[in-house]
Amino acid sequence: MSSTQYSFDPESIDFYDYTRADWFLVSYREGARSVAGPYIDFGGVNDYILTMTTPILPGRSFAGVAGADLRVDELERRLYHAAAGCRRTSRSSTTPTGSSGRPLRGSSPARC
């Protein structure tokens, strides 16, 4: 995988203003952890990713955001294998949803 070079010079045509990215703004504005995506990380891994962030708040003042990208296919694989080892403990079913209210669950039969 090749390394992507970003320009943080506001005068550059290739300027990457991360302070306008959803993954930065939510943690900054709400002062809480957030998950952005899934979206295609063009210029990065060029695949669907989720970006998870948390604000850095030393002394309760905003100092920045710490975050990590997780490829959706890797998350799906790990969740599938974790769920495959579970046993269903009740007949009720809960479907987690994203911030848009859309389900974060596939159509495969539940395993837990």
Image: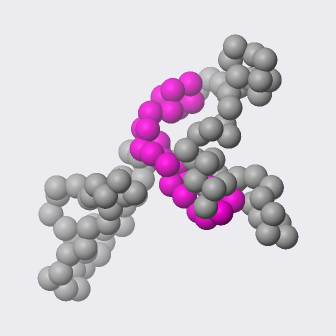
The residue shown at (61%, 48%) is 25
The residue shown at (22%, 55%) is 106
Residue 71 position in % (x across, y down) = 47, 44
Where the C terminus falls, by quadrant? Answer: bottom left
- What is the magenta range? 31-55
Magenta residue check for 37: yes
User: Which quadrant holds residue 84?
Assistant: bottom left
**Residue 8 seen in the current view:** yes
User: Which quadrant holds residue 98?
Assistant: bottom left
Foreground residue, 70 or 1?
70
**Would residue 96 be found to the left or right of residue 6 on screen?**
left
| Helix, strand or loop: magenta stretch | strand
Which residue is situated farthest in the front direction here?
29
**Would residue 73 be found to the left or right of residue 22 on screen?**
left
Residue 82 position in % (x across, y down) = 36, 66
Residue 83 position in % (x across, y down) = 31, 68
**Would residue 84 be found to the left or right of residue 35 on screen?**
left
The residue shown at (80%, 55%) is 63
Which residue is situated farthest in the top direction here?
13
Q: Is residue 106 above or below residue 43?
A: below
The residue shown at (16%, 55%) is 107
User: Which quadrant holds residue 104?
Assistant: bottom left
Q: Is residue 9 above or below residue 73?
A: above
Magenta residue check for 52: yes
